[in-house]
Amino acid sequence: MGLGRFLSFTDFWDLLPLVTLSLAAAVLMGIMAGVVGPMVQARDLAFAVHGIAELSFTGAAAALLLGVSVVGGSLVGSLIAAMTFGLLGVRARERNSAIGVVMAFGLGLGVLFASLYSGRTANKFGALVGQPSAVTGEALGVLAVVAVLVIGAMTLLWRPLFFGSVDPDVAVARGVRMGLLGPAFMVVLGLTVAMAVQIIGALLVLSLLITPTAAASRVTASPLRVTLLSVLFATTSAVGGVLLALSPGLPISPYVTTLSFLIYLVCRLIGRRRTRRGWGARARVAVPA
């Protein structure tokens, strides 16, 4: 089994027009994931992202069984999960335990719904590993609307959210309404995860929402630069995965996850080199109220 089997681009230019919608979806997804990712890291919600993705699969499987929109089912599942996790507790230990319990039960329901579905087998696994090649104009339209909502919401919420994540006590003392910000961000996170599930699947959402931000934070401590680099890394991974998937042999998911991981390794090496040379002293982050 040679490497050429997975990296053969003989028909690349002939196939490229067929994935135009997928490339547009990958760009939108990269921007959304890159913008939301730094706040996920700041609020220690990586496990919640995994849980929301799993329950998004449950919603998609239920929709598949009922014969309704899979994208709609995925959205409903993500939003219910996000709001539930947002109400489960403030402390990370309490929240993660509750997420683990709810996620396991929800994933079991998803497997049950998928087992009861008697249609095409590929549809059962589409929500788990993604189906970017099946992006339609309607799905792209939904993704574009969600992207506008997510980016608009993050533009409004970014400053108080980051302030509240860094020092919640001072943020409350300065009048930041933490009780509303948390649920609002969970809705934004639920929308983003639901769209990511359509591109890369529930099992691999972390490669777009966590890994790019983790890579960016290895080379800079500036919140703005972390966000910009996260957008760049997430978009590069998603678009690169779609382009590499034009080579026959593998679906898009392994390409996206591999690119994302390679970017992380490179950034980690750069960060270590900067630290050894004395450039790694992280600047204090000033958060205006």
Image (tube, rainbow, N blue to C red):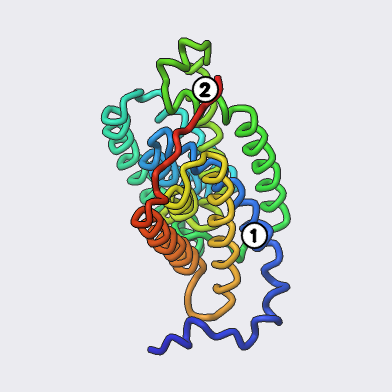
Instruction: Determine the residue positioned at 39% across, 44% down.
Output: 281
Going by the image, does 191 lie left or right of 12?
left
Which circle marks residue 181 in the picture?
2
| Residue 98 image point, x, y percent | 30, 31
Checking the image for residue 77, the label placed there is none
Residue at image point 52% right, 11% down: 175
Identify which amino acid the numbered label 1 is placed on: Val
Quadrant containing the N terminus is bottom left
Which of the 4 quarters of the picture holds residue 131?
bottom right
- Name the image quarter holding the C terminus: top right
Task: Name the residue beneath numbered marker 1.
Answer: 135
Crowd rating for badge 1 (residues with CA inside 10 Å; few <14, some 14–19, many 20+): some
Is 222 placed above or below 248 here? above
Residue 284 seen in this snapshot: yes
Q: Position of residue 269 (x, y in %)?
A: 38, 62
Nearer the camera: disc 1 or disc 2:
2
Q: CA distance from mark 1 to mark 2?
A: 32 Å
76 left or right, relative to 2: right
- Specify which label sits upstream in the sequence, 1 or 2: 1
Closer to the camera in the image, 113 or 91: 91
Amino acid under label 2?
Answer: Leu
SS for tag 2? helix
Picture coordinates of residue 241 (x, y %)?
54, 67
- Most extreme residue toward the front is 278
Front residue of this view, candidates 113 and 77: 77
